Amino acid sequence: MYDYEKKHFDQVRHVAPECMVLLKKNGDFPLSQPEKIALYGSGARQTIKGGTGSGDVNSRFYVSVEQGLESAGCTITTKEWLNAYDVIREEAKEEFIARIKQEAKERHVLAVMYGMGAVMPEPEYELPMNGEGETAVYVLSRISGEGSDRKSVEGDLLLSKTEVRDILYLQEHYTRFLLVLNVGGPVDLSPVQAVENVLLLSQLGVATGDALADVILGKAEPSGKLTTTWTDWNSYPKIGEFGQQDDTRYYEGIYVGYRYFDAAQVTPLYPFGYGLGYTDFALDKANVSTQGTCVTVEVPVRNVGEHPGRETVQVYVSAPSGRLDQPYQALAGFGKSIRLHPGESSSVTVTFAMEDLASYDENAVAWVLEAGDYLIRVGNSSRNTTLSGVIRLAEDVCVRKVHSVGGTPDFQDWTPPAMETETLPEDLRVLTMQADAFSTLSWPQPWSCSQYTEGVVSTLSDEQLVHLSMGLFAKGPTSIIGNAAQTVAGAAGETYGKINGLPGLVMADGPAGLRLNQKYTRDKKGIPHAIGNTFPAGMDDYLPGIAQKFLNFTNNRQPKGEVFEQYCTAIPIGTALAQSWNIDLVESCGDLVGEEMERFGVHLWLAPAFNIHRNVLCGRNFEYYSEDPLLSGKMGAAITRGVQRHSGCGTTVKHFCCNNQETNRLASNSVVSQRALREIYLRAFQICIREADPAALMTSYNLLNGVHTSERVDLLQTVLREEWGYRGLIMTDWVVPGLGKAGKHRFAKSAPSIAAGNVFMPGSQGDFNAAVNAMHGKNKDFTLSRKDAERCAAQVVELVRRLILERKH
C-alpha cells in the first residue's frame, strides 16, 4: 500500500463509527475484551462495502467483518457454517444469473443491461447454528445499485424465512447476541423485534470490518442517527406511485418521509433522526434567541451514562397552517456535541434563518411565511422533542417572488386531515418578529460568463461549438459502462479538449470515492489502456459466454510496457455519511476524495448525489443522503467544500431533479406539483449551491411533467442561472441508448439539451450530427440557435479556465 492509501484507510476507520446507528441495546455491548464469537449471516464473510454501478469503487481491498474481528483478536468459531453458506450462495447466484439472462432474451434486450443493479434475493437454507462461545453476531446484508429498484419481497426489503428463524434462534440461545445490519437502506425488522441489540452498520467502505470490531470491543462508539424512517413495509405510505414504467405521480406532495408519518399519525419502528449510543444523554432547557431573521437555539447536553459518546441535537419547526397546509414539523437545523465522557457536558448551538422556513405558494408564485406561531422543537429525534420556544410572525411575509417552473401535474396533492390545535405552556418564551426584518434580504445575481470566455466562443465554428457542448465521445461499449475517458484510465468521461488549445475536463464516477481502473499501461501516444476488467462489479456476469471468454483472456494477458497503479479509497456510502449528522466529518471525507483527484488527474467528481429518499425501494438510495432536503443539502455542501479545497478539483451535484426510481430511468416521467418540486426536490440543490458553489451539476435521466429535465430551460436557466445565480457547468447524465428501451416517452436528445444549456454526455457521432443539423435547419425535430450553442459551450470554457488554466498561471 502507498502511504496515501494507509492514511486514507485509517481516516475511514476513524470516522466510520459515527456513521453507525445503534437501534436497540440492553447493555451487553461493548465487549470488555476479544473472545470467541459465533459469527453468522450473509454479510459475515461477504461483507458489502458499498452499492453497485457508478457508486462502486475499485479499492485495492476492503476488510470484511470476519477479517476485522479476527484482526482484533477474536476467535471465529463458525468457519464450517461460513464455508457451507458460501457454497449455497454461489449456487443461488448461478441460478439467478441464468434466470436474468433468460428473461433478457425473452424481452429482446441485452442481459448485461437488463441485469444492471439486479438484486439476488437472499436464498433459503438450513445450516446448524452450533458455534462455540457466549457471544453471537449475525450480519444481515443487502445490496442494491444503479439500474434496478429493490422489491418488497423476502430476501430483499423483507427478511427471508431463514433469516428470521436463525436470528430469533441466536437471540434465544446465546448469552449475548448482536444483530448487525450491513445494508444500504431499510429492511423490515418487524419479525425480529425480540432481538435486544441491533446495530445498523451500513456500508462503510474499505474499513467496514475493522470499524465494526472497534465498536464491538468498545474502542469506538456508534453515534449515528437515522436519515430515513425505518418501519414495517405495510406502514410505509402507498399514496404516491412508484416504479411505474412511464408516468409516476407524486400524489403525496410535500408529505415525504417523516412528514407523512407525522401527518398520518403513524408510529414507525425507528423514526427519522433516531439513534442510540452506548451511553445516554440529557438535553437541558434550550435558550432561543433572534437577531434579524436569524434564530439561534443553544442546548446544554449532558452525558448521564457510563460510556463516552456524542449526541446530535435536532431542531424542528412547526409552521402555522393558513392558506397552505403544513407538515407537523420540519427539520430546521442540527448540531453534534463533542465527545463527552460520563458526567461531562457541553453546549450545542443551532442557527437557522426564518426565510429558509418559507413555503412555496403556487398561486402567488412566491416563497411566503404566513402570519402566526412558529413552534421551535428541540430533541434527539423527530419523535423525541420538547417545545422550546415560539417565533411569532405578526403578518404575512412575501419572502421572494420567483417564477412558475416545472410544469403542472394532472392532480391535486394529497393533504392530510387537520391536526388538533396544540396548547402552548404558559411559561413558553415567545419572540415576536416583524415583517420589516425581511426587507434587507438579498439574492444571488444571475450568472454571466467572463469576457475571456465570450471572446473564445465567438470565434468558434458551429461544429466546434457543438463539440464543446458534448463529451469527448468514445467508440464501443466504454460509454455504456461509464468508462469513456481517454486521459485517465477508468474515468467516466471528459469534455472535448481539442479546440484552440483548450484542455478537456476529466470526470470520474462514484459517490463513495473515485471509480477508476486499478492498473493501466500507456501506448506510444500516452493514451492509457486499462488492465483487467473495466466493467462495474457484477455487470460482467451477464455477458454472453464468448464475451466472457474474451474478457478472461484479456484480463489474464501479460501487459506490455510499464504498469501504472491508481488505487482509490472507498469511503462510506452517502446514506452512511449523512447518518453521522456531522458536517466536519463529511467535509473531511470530501477532502480525502479531493486529494486522490489531484493525485490521479481528475477534475470533476460525479458526486455527490442527493436525490430524496422518496420511497425505500429506490435502488440508488444508498448513494443519496436522506428523506429530508435540509439534511441532504447540508451534507452535499460539506463534501463539496472538502473536495474543492483542492485546486483544480470540483464536485458534480446530481441528479437534478426528481430522479427517485431506477425503473425505466431514461424515459420515466415524474409528475410532481410545483410546491413539492420547490420544497422537497430542488431544495437540497439550492442549499448546496448557496453554501458550497459546486463546480458542476448533472441533470437526471427522467422527464419532469412531460419534458426531460435535461431539456428544461425553466430549470436550467430560470432556476439555476437566474434565481440561484449558479455559475458552474451543467451536464446531462450519460445518455446511452444501450442503457434501456424507450416506451411512451423518448430518451433525451442532444439538440434540445444543448439548447437548454446542457452539455450532452458522453456524446456520440450520432448525437453530434443531430445537433449540427439542428443548427443548420436539417433536423426535422429540433432547432438549435447559434446563441444557445454559444451559451452552452461558454460554460465549458469557463470551467476549464477556473479549474485548469488559472491553476497553471
Image: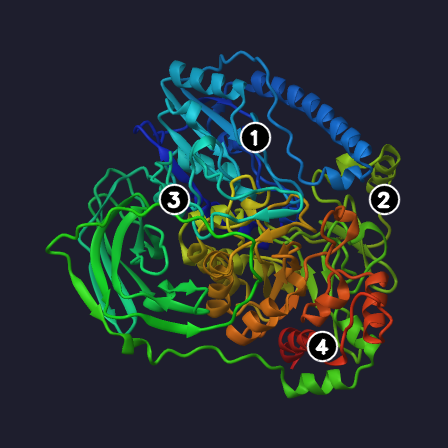
Circle 2: element type: loop
Q: Which amino acid does label 3 sit on?
A: Phe
Closer to the eye: label 3 or 4: 4
Q: What residue type is labelled 2?
A: Gln
Give residue 808's position: percent from left, percent from top. Answer: 66, 78
Determine whether, in the image, residue 542 is placed left or right of residue 634: right
Closer to the eye: label 2 or 1: 1
Give residue 412's position: percent from left, percent from top. Answer: 48, 52
- Figure quadrant of the C terminus: bottom right
Q: Residue at x 84, y 48 (%)?
A: 559
Distance Cα–Cα, label 2 vs label 1: 40 Å
Q: Name the residue under label 4.
A: 788
Q: Earlier in the sequence, mark 1 or mark 4?
A: 1
Determine whether, in the image, residue 669 is placed left or right of residue 78: right
Label ID, residue 156: 1
Label ID, residue 272: 3
Closer to the eye: label 2 or 3: 3
**In front of the other: 283 or 524:** 283
Q: What residue type is labelled 4?
A: Asp
Q: Residue at x 52, y 68 (%)?
A: 404
Vertical placement of residue 694 versus 556, above or below: below
Q: Which amino acid does label 1 sit on?
A: Asp
Distance Cα–Cα, label 1 vs label 4: 46 Å
Vertical placement of residue 6 versus 267, above or below: below
Give residue 40's position: percent from left, percent from top. Answer: 51, 22
Circle 4: element type: helix
Circle 3: element type: loop
Q: Earlier in the sequence, mark 1 or mark 3?
A: 1
Q: Earlier in the sequence, mark 4 or mark 2?
A: 2
Q: Mark 2 points at which residue?
A: 558
Determine contact: label 3, label 4, CB under 8 Å. Answer: no
**In front of the other: 287 or 505:** 287
